Image (cartoon, rainbow, N blue to C red):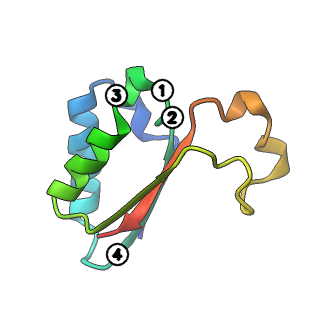
Amino acid sequence: ALISNLVFHEVRNEKNKLKLLLESLRVLKKGGKFAIIDLFENKKLYGDMDRLIEGLKRAGVSDVHYDKDIKNLPFMPKIVRTPFMFNDIGILWGEK
């Protein structure tokens, strides 16, 4: 499994973010699951999410999902459900 929480946005270049995601997923075994929470809705950091997802699919990730409304997910603690915490956050998950 691969789990990341607010890490990938620290890479400043969109192309390098895709490279980092691909390398992280490369070491994941086929059938392995991943969940990445990050500032995906910040277009300056990630660009177009559809393009990012297509890049992952072209690289062999078989199952990719994205949700930009994570504040109401049952596993999110109430203390971090304040609106200012979730303006740009989304979750990318799936299976290799």
Side of 71 where 25 appears, left or right: left
Side of 7 where 62 appears, left or right: left
* Closer to us: 17 or 27: 17
Q: Where does label 3 land, which residue?
A: 47
- Secondary element at tag 4: loop
- Secondary element at tag 2: loop
Side of 15 where 31 appears, left or right: right
In the depicted structure, whether residue 85 falls above or below residue 72: above
> Between disc 4 and disc 3, whose residue precedes?
4
Q: Where does label 1 land, which residue?
A: 42
> Between disc 4 and disc 1, whose residue precedes?
4
Quarter of the figure that contains the N terminus: bottom left
The residues tagged by marks 1 and 3 sit, at their Cα atoms, a distance apart of 7 Å
- Secondary element at tag 3: loop
The residues tagged by marks 4 and 2 sit, at their Cα atoms, a distance apart of 23 Å
In this rendering, which labeled residue sits more in front, label 3 or label 2?
3
Q: Where does label 4 land, which residue?
A: 32
In this rendering, which labeled residue sits more in front, label 4 or label 3?
3
The residues tagged by marks 4 and 1 sit, at their Cα atoms, a distance apart of 27 Å
> Between disc 3 and disc 2, whose residue precedes?
2
Residue 96, quarter of the rendered image: bottom left
The dot on residue 39 is 2
- Secondary element at tag 1: loop
